[in-house]
Amino acid sequence: MKLIIKPVIKSNICVRVHPIGCRENVKRQIDHVKKEGHFEGPKKALIVGGSSGYGLASRIALAFGAGTETVNVSFEIPPKGSSKTGTAGWWNNVYFQQFAKEAGLSCKDFVGDAFSKEMKDQVLTYLKEKVGKIDLLVYSLASNRRTDPKDGVTYSSVLKSIGEEVRGYTIDINNLSLKEEVMETATEDEIQSTIKVMGGEDWQWWVELLDEAGLLADGFKTIAYTYLGSEATYAIYSDGTIGQAKKHLEMSAEKMTKELKEKYDGEALISSSKAIVTKASIYIPIFPVYGAVLYKVMKEMGTHEGEIEQKYRLFKDMIYGDKRITDVKGRIRPDNLEMEEDVQEEVARLMATVNNDNIQEKTDIKGFVEDFLRINGFCFDTVDYEADVDLEELAKLPLE
C-alpha cells in the first residue's frame, strides 16, 4: 500500500516524517560540505546522537569534509507497515549510509539506547574488532529520559525555571501565531533528575570506557554541545533546569581535560551552538519566538547559519584549524555571530514589540517554521509531496 504523506503536527511535535524529504535534507548538507571543500580532521570518530540536528551535521561535516570514518549511536524508531513513517533520524541514518558508501566512506550505525551499558558494550566490541582507536568523540545526545545502569533508576528531565515561574510567548506551529506559555518552577528533585539526564555523567562514562578499552588515540578530543544565548533566553535556559545540566556538562569537561591531557595530549571541549530549530529546541518554552526574531535579524545582516554551516566551520576552523574562538571559561564559541552586539540589540528591540498583529513583520516565522518542517522531511521544493510513498518498499533499505 502506498500513501501520500503530509505533515501532522500536534503540540508542536511533527508525528509524521517524509522519507524522501529526509533524503533531501541529508543530501543538501552533504552538497554544502562538498562545495566548501576538504579539511584535515580526525580519521575515526564516534558520534553519540548523530542522527539529527547538530549531531547529524557534525557527522556529515566530518565524513564529507575530512573523510572521517564515523560510527553513530542513536535511538530511532523504524517505519512499520504501510502507514507508520518512523522517525526522521531513522531515515537520516539510512540515507547518510547510502551517500557515504557511494563516496567510499566507512560508516556504521547502532540504533538503541546510548545510555545503556549493553549498547556501550556493543559499540566498544565493534570498535575493537573493526575500527581501532578513535580520534574524536562527539556527544550530541538529546533525551528526556535516562535509565542509569549503575543504579537502575529512570530519571526524567524537565524544562522548568528555577526560583520563580516565567511567562512569555511561544509559537504555535499550526497557526503561525503566538501563544502565551508558562514555564513552571522546578523542584530540587526535578533539577537533579535533569542533571542526571542532560549533564555530563553519561558523556564522561563513554570516555572512561573507551579509555579502559584502549580505544583512544594520541591527541584524542571529545566535544559536547551547549547553548548559552543572550539575556533574552537566560530565564528559560541558562538560569533554568537545562542550564544546571549544562553547568554539570562543563564541570565534566574540565575534569576530563586534565586526565586526557596527561594520558593522550588530548582535550574535552564544550562548544556553544547557535540557536536554530532542532528536535530539542522546538520544545523549549518561549525559545521559538527568540529563534524566529534571530532568524530575521541574522538573515538581513547576512550572517545566518544553519546546522551544517556552523558545524563545518566549527570543525574546520576551530577544532582542527587555527581559528578557535573561546570565551573566558574556555568554551568554544561558534555562536559568535549570534552574540554580536548589534545582532542582540536588534533582537531585543524586536522582541519587545512583537505581537500577533505584527509577527510576520517583526520575525522570520515563515523561515523558522520551514526549518522545523525540513527536519521532518517536508518543505523541500525538489520533493513531490503529492506523490505516493511506498513505505514498505523503502523500509527494505539497509541500515548497517
Image (spheres, rainbow, N blue to C red):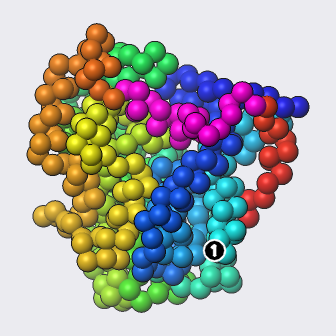
Residue 63 image position (x, y, % from top left): 54, 70
Q: Residue at x 31, y 37 (%)?
A: 295
Residue 230 visible in the snapshot: yes
Q: Which residue is mark 1?
A: 105
Which range of residues does the magenta coloring cover? Answer: 365-387
**In-image side of 326 versus 56 (left or right):** left
| Residue found at x 11% / y 45% | 341
Q: What residue is at 79 percent from the left and 54 percent from the top? A: 397
Which quarter of the figure has residue 231?
Answer: top left
Query: Does residue 330 belong to the magenta stretch?
Result: no
Dividing the picture into quadrants, the one containing residue 316 is bottom left
- Specify the amino acid type for callout 1: Leu
Horizontal side, residue 395 vs residue 356: left or right: right
Location of residue 367 in the rendering, given as x and y in whole percent from the top left corner: 40, 32
As rendered, which of 306 and 387 lies closer to the eye? 387
Residue drawn at (42%, 51%) of the image:
307
Element marked by disc 1: loop
Whether residue 381 is in magenta: the answer is yes
